[in-house]
Image (tube, rainbow, N blue to C red):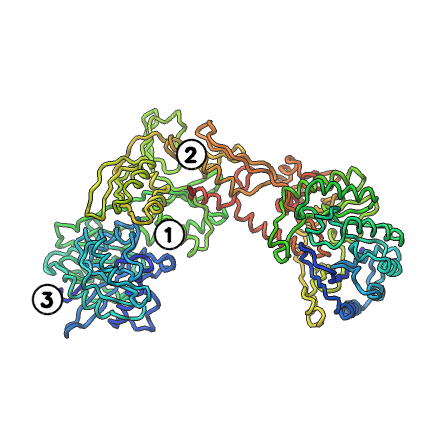
Amino acid sequence: MERQKYIRNFCIIAHIDHGKSTLADRLIERTGTLNKRDLSEQVLDSMDIERERGITIKLTPVRMAYNKDGQTYLLNLIDTPGHVDFTYEVSRSLAACEGAVLVVDASQGVEAQTLANVYLAVDNNLEILPVINKIDLPSARPEEVKAEIEDVIGVDASMAPLVSAKEGIGIDEVLDKVIEYFPPPKGDADKPLRALIFDSFYDNYKGAVCLIRVIDGCVRPGTRIRLMHTKREFDTVEVGVFTPKMSECDALYAGDVGYLTASIKNVADTAPGDTVTDAARPTDTPCPGYKPVQPVVYCGIYPTDGAKYNDLKEALERLKLNDAALFYEPEVSVALGFGFRCGFLGLLHMEIIEERLEREFGLDLITTAPGVNYLVTRSNGEQLTVTNPSNLPPPGEIASVSEPIVKAYVYTPPEYIGTIMELCQEKRGEYIDMTYLDKTRVRMYYEIPLNEIVYDFFDGLKSRTRGYASLDYEIKGYKESELVKLDIMLNNEVCDAFSLIVHRDKAYARGRSIAEKLKEVIPRQMFEIPIQAAIGSKVIARETVKAMRKDVLAKCYGGDISRKKKLLEKQKEGKKRMRQVGSVEVPSEAFLSVLKLDK
Amino acid sequence: MAAAAGVYIHIPYCKQRCGYCSFVSSCDPSTQEAYAARVKAELAGIKSERIAADTLYIGGGTPSVLRRGLLSDLIAAVRAAFLLDADAEITAECNPESCTDDFLSEAKNAGVNRLSMGLQDADDTVLRGAGRLHSRADFVGAVGRARAAGLENLSVDLMLGLPGQTVTHVEASVKLLLSLDIPHISVYALKLEPDSALAKSYTPDEDLEADFYQCAAGLLTAAGRARYEVSNFARPGRESRHNLKYWTHTPYYGFGVAAHSFYHEMRYANPDSLTEYLSGASRRTETPLSPEELREETVMLRLRLAAGLELDAYEQKFGENLREKKAAEIRSLCALGMIEIKNGRLFATDRGMYLLNSLILRLI
């Protein structure tokens, strides 16, 4: 108990660009955890994509030692991802903390996107310590921003440290306040082991590395552990803390944050939210809040160059090692050849995987429109699950189709209630209720088909509320619905890669906008190309790409044929990004552009 | 025996730069003598055994703006460096406004027997818009003077897609040339390189250019000017022997700034900066052609010709039976009416000729 008094577990919540990573760097530097030379800029966000997007996907905890009043404190900083796709992951990492430092930019003030995570922290009973950052900027208005924090978020900001992480101002005060403000971890080291897994990653030598917060008890090398939800048992090989490098230690006790390895081959066995206990002396109460990982969004991923199928396969295998939430299985498309149907936690997760495949593995990809899984009952009573629209049986053989419905909670300032209601109605949402959480914050509860959410709900919500509303959703179940398959035909041949399952009422508008978009992105070819959107045999929209009439470079430049060759090389390059769909050459961007139909 | 070579001399001088131009050209005549001396030095450098040539093309720029005497000098230097055939086709480019009697008589005396004149369009408004210095009347006058000087073998350039140009203008321009009984006509579509003045304010419409081309090609072929190359129409026997070398991988030697050459299965390019060329500091860059490049070039260049690609010769040279290797593409292009195969030759049809790049891409 004495030991726990000197531990603080906390995270930092901030809007993109408000300086979370810089502040984390300064804390690490000030506590001497790393010296300036070793501190590559922004230690915590280690993936390129994270640095570029300013978001955190993988969580990296850091243990820091700090002296205050002659006493050494251990401060565990746990980083959190910042997106709704990872709400569950965020909630698990918050569950490992007692406090959250809320970084707010002194000139920008509170940004809407931060709110969802702040509320999540409040719901997890975390203490919130506001920190006003970037006070060195001429446009800083710390007093106004403090008032805003109290107004909008409803936490006391009077004693918020004024900081410039960039200039190193106020860092000590943040560390002091973390110790004063945040409670030490509760828990009892003598009770049976109970530790929360809040993330895991794959290490080539150690296998799955579980990031854990020990709630009760203790774990050390040799402890036979049981994962309570997956019910698997392993022998602990190593425990340790992040400094921020992995540093082995003898044991982790109640209140500690660290890692554990146990020759676990597969990160899928170490699901976030699962509870680690001692197999010989198990606890009877697992940590609350566990949810199994389940993909909710699916899409087809194909190599632009069909010969790269095996490269794509290997890349997915590699990513899967580290990402239990990624699902994939081989599939074949008439238009795109061999590829994979992949499942994701949400749209951002999907984008991140695509980007990592392209960037880290150098692959050129074609992605089909994201969809969800549908439950289909055939006329003969047989049931099947369809994630790829091409596998939907012909209309005559279908008795019914059900689609996943989510409970969607939209958090918003009251002035956007009207516009959000409109949006939810357009998206076939069913209003359930609305709660005023306080005078500045409303929670609207709708039940909406997931298929509408994955389409462009986020973009709509963001643009209609200037980013002030946020969305949280969970799967509620399935509901029968009037769903049809929308096909796109190019030069009178169905291109399966464009097929979609949509609600009958939406099919016409969707078909028309896809046809219009394709007309823009499919280059003119030697013949006229009709583009048709159809439900079954009924054509509901039609556009035409006119035949190209001239592409020759006519001039003779005194025997200089280099321009002609250059043009030819350019066209050869262009052709590589083309997919032959029947007689039509379709640029790979076309597959992407129909996913992003602008209003 | 190897086919006789062609010789090209670039004259980078103009009175005024046209808005669409991206050739190396200067409006400052003060370096003309120094330039001619450099070209002569370059010619002298060819030496060893004299190479047989049967065409000489003096292009630009505007060769007719050279100070009197320089053109004859240069042609004499070519004769000294090459074994120029007695029947050689010797072409000089000129513009109507600088096609003076002095120029014509100097050209004629130096052995020039073919003139290539830039008209571009027969409408004065269109001409002004393109930054041309001459009028329709100037052109008609120049043609008369050329003939009076004994230069009968005339070629005239038309440009399609100029600002303000309509199909009526194109039709009138072609008809003017036919009424003047011009035997060889080149019809170029305007392609603006990003470094030309006009590119900043104007983008030619390729559909419109296709309409213009169709109109011009129809009138010209009906009047007995057969299309022997995508942009070139001539009365039989009046084809440009020099330009044909470019499309048939016949050796040609280019001299002067930015001039290009092809011989010994290699491509060469002179520096494209006039200052650099005048300094004599840099030599021509050499680019050897891989067999694969040579093969692709063959398809690309031969298909520009009405005669097309001789399939047996192609197979002999590259060991590849195009008919078998590209069977599906050839079938679909034939079905689309873009190409035909007749008498062992694969060639672009009327429809296919203006879509050559797409055809080539499918056939290489």
Q: Is residue A291 visible?
A: yes
Residue B77 x %, y %: 83, 66
- Label 2 SS: helix
Are both tags, 3 and 1, on one chain?
yes
Q: Name the residue under label 1.
A: A352
Q: Earlier in the sequence, mark 3 or mark 2?
A: 3
Residue A593 x %, y %: 46, 44
Mark 3 burial class by Cα count in 10 Å: few <14, some 14-19, many 20+:
few
Tell me if label 3 and label 2 are in contact, CB under 8 Å: no
Relative to A312, residue A449 above or below: above
Quadrant of the frame with the N terminus of chain B: bottom right
Tell me if label 3 and label 1 are in contact, CB under 8 Å: no
Three-letter amino acid code at disc 1?
Ile
Relative to B129, residue A584 above or below: above
Tell me if label 1 and label 2 are in contact, CB under 8 Å: no
Residue A169 x %, y %: 27, 70
Seen in the image, is A312 located left or right of residue A238?
right
Q: Name the residue under label 3.
A: A2
- Label 3 SS: loop
Q: Nearer the viewer, mark 1 or mark 2?
A: 2
Q: Name the residue under label 2.
A: A509
Gap in Å between the C-alphas at discs 3 and 1?
43 Å
Seen in the image, is B21 located left or right of residue A299?
right
Are both tags, 3 and 2, on one chain?
yes
Q: In this rendered view, identify the residue nearer to me: A543 or A205.
A: A543
Q: Which of marks 1 and 2 is nearer the N terminus?
A: 1
Q: Can residue A266 be seen in this view?
A: no
Three-letter amino acid code at disc 2?
Ala
